Structures are given as structure tokens and as C-alpha cells.
Image (cartoon, rainbow, N blue to C red):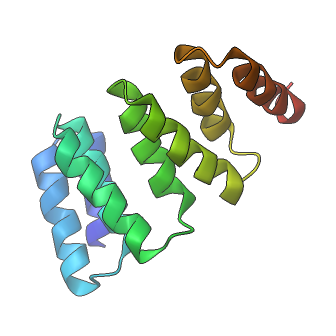
Amino acid sequence: YFNLMGLVRNALGDCLEAVAAYEKAIKLDPKYKEAICSKGQAYRDFGMAAEATKQFTKSIEIDPNYANAYHLRSFLHFSQGRHSGCIKDSIRVVELEPKHKDGLYLLALSYHDIGQCRKAIETYDKLLKYYP
């Protein structure tokens, strides 16, 4: 219930209430990776990038195969111009989910932004293979 309440509060733009709801869910289950990741999203939406990164990382520590946490952290890296972090996390997303549209897209954009155009083209080709 608390995780769902957090999702609704965050959708309404009430990030602090969302964080409070996620914290209640996490208190009930400290390994609730989805609630921890959602808490990271709320922090991100509130402009607290460092805290958001901590939450995404905590989700990954709980489940190293949780593609959503890698994706959200990669997007945060990208939005802050940290392309090496974005590339590393996006590669992991695509390893876990080879057809992950946003993971492939962020990976291609980051390669392009750092001048690795051949890798960007290869990644766009993979993206077009799955999503023509």
C-alpha cells in the first residue's frame, strides 16, 4: 500500500510525501527494491540528484539484475552530462534486457555525445532492429 501511495503522491508532484510513503514501505521490507528505486525517482524529481543516485545504487546492491534501477541511474548520469556513468549503466541494462528501448537509446546518445560515432551507429542499428 505505501509504495502505491508513494507513486500517486509523486505523480501529483508531492515528492516529500512520496518519499515519506516509500520510507514506510521500506521500513516494512528493507529489501523492497522497487520502493527504494521509486524513492530515488522522487528525489530525482525533487532535484536531489545525489540522494537519487544513492537510492538507485541501493536497489542495485539488493538486486544486481534489476534493470530498472540501472536505467534510472543511467538517465540521471546522462542528464548531468556524466556520459561514462550513463554508458556503463546502459550497457548493463542492455545486457539484462537486450530489447530495452530506452537503454539502447541512452547508450547511443552517450556514445554520440562523446564522439564515439561508430558505436553510436551500431547501437542505433540494434535499436532499429527491434523498433523500426
Tell me residue 77's x, y (percent): 38, 35
Instruction: Please count the marks in the image.
Output: 0
Q: Is residue 19 left or right of residue 8?
A: left
Q: Is residue 30 left or right of residue 105?
A: left
Residue 75, image quadrant? top left
Q: Quadrant of the N terminus?
A: bottom left
- Furthest toward the bottom, the residue is 28
Residue 115, image quadrant? top right
Q: Would residue 8 be visible to someone looking at this image?
A: no
Tell me residue 37's x, y (percent): 35, 59
**Closer to the camera, 40 or 16?**
40
Relative to 51, residue 30 above or below: below
Q: Quadrant of the C terminus?
A: top right
Q: Is residue 38 left or right of residue 64?
A: left
The residue under the point 19% across, 45% down is 50
Tell me residue 30's x, y (percent): 27, 82
Tell me residue 20's x, y (percent): 12, 62
The residue under the point 17% across, 37% down is 46
Relative to 59, residue 131 above or below: above
Q: Would residue 126 be visible to someone looking at this image?
A: yes
Relative to 122, residue 48 above or below: below
**Closer to the camera, 4 or 129?**
129
The residue under the point 76% across, 45% down is 99
Relative to 114, residue 70 above or below: below
Residue 5, image quadrant? bottom left
**Closer to the camera, 10 or 100?**
100
The residue under the point 12% across, 53% down is 17
Q: Is residue 94 left or right of residue 114?
A: right
